[in-house]
Image (cartoon, rainbow, N blue to C red):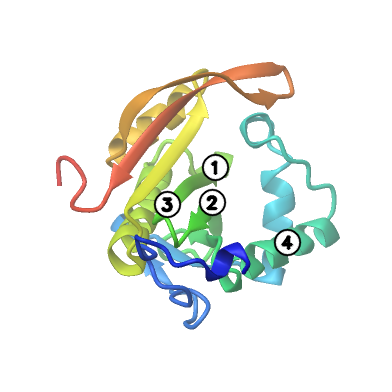
Amino acid sequence: MHDGAVPRLVPPVVPAGRMRDSEQPVLVAAGGLTLRPWLPSDASVVVAAYSDPAIRRWHRRDVASEDEARELIAAWNRGWRAETTGCWAVVAAGQGQVVGRVAIRDVSLLLGLGEVGYWVLPAARGAGVAARAVREASRWALDDLGLHRLELGHSVANAASCRVAAKAGFRLEGTLHRALLHTDGWHDMHLHARTGGPPPGS
């Protein structure tokens, strides 16, 4: 008998199929931001994003061409069908331009867990885009999908992400020492989290 056939004392927090059996939703965040699935035609935006020094520093990824960007977009979209990732393009109100990305990744429906990731293009920074997008994606993950806990981690050197986490209702739980390798060496990481229910201050 393989392990998957052994009965569990605790059922999955979210039943399998809840993501793959439905279309990835379009979400609307405060301030008129739209969160929509990524399209192959967004490839030039992805190349521009991963050419930005700040995004490259914290996300540790290199996307050198539009072909690579389309492959990455396809991987993000496959994550929905695999029930491991929900990844959205963040579109500015009234402009139709992609200004950022937000994702609920490393999803475990069994455990009810997910991890938040995001970036914002330079021209859209400083306007609260990241916090609003993270707040709405988190609301969907906790309320609509039914996850129990979301985590948001970032380098302790990334003060802007600390502010985003707080504004999006994520409490700082602690520091993970020398937890993630960046291009300049090992970084301590802040761990923030949100669980089901309304975020603090709402």
Q: Position of residue 191 (x, y in %)?
A: 42, 30
- The disc, 3 or 1, on the residue closer to the chain's N-terminal end is 3
Q: Residue at x 41, y 47 (%)?
A: 129
Residue 123 marker: 1
Image location (x, y in percent) of residue 55:
63, 36
Q: Gap in Å between the C-alphas at discs 3 and 1? A: 32 Å
Picture layout, residue 67 above or below residue 125: below
Q: Earlier in the sequence, mark 3 or mark 4?
A: 4
Determine the residue positioned at 47% across, 82% down.
22
Q: How many marks do you count on the picture?
A: 4
* Real-space CA distance between mark 4 and mark 2, rounded to the nearest whole angstrom: 13 Å
Crowding around mark 1 (Cα neighbors within 10 Å: few <14, some 14 to 19, many 20+) is few
Instruction: From this view, report whether residue 32 is shown above or below residue 149.
Output: below
Q: Residues within 10 Å of mark 4 (few under 14, many from 20)?
A: many
Quadrant of res 40: bottom right
Residue at (68% x, 37% y) in the render: 52
Q: Secondary structure at mark 3?
A: strand
Mark 4, secondary structure of its residue:
helix
Q: Which residue is mark 3?
A: 113
Residue located 15% across and 47% down the image:
202
Look at mark 2 in the image and give the residue it sits on.
Answer: 100
| Front one among 111 and 100 | 111
On screen, residue 5 versus residue 74, left or right, reads left
State the CA–CA distance, disc 4 to disc 1. 18 Å
Residue type, mark 1 in image:
Ala
Q: At label 2, which amino acid type do we have?
A: Gly
Alpha-carbon neighbours of circle 2 within 10 Å: few (<14), some, or many (≥20)?
Answer: many
Per the rendering, the mark at residue 43 is 4
User: Mark 4 or mark 1: which is in front?
Assistant: 4
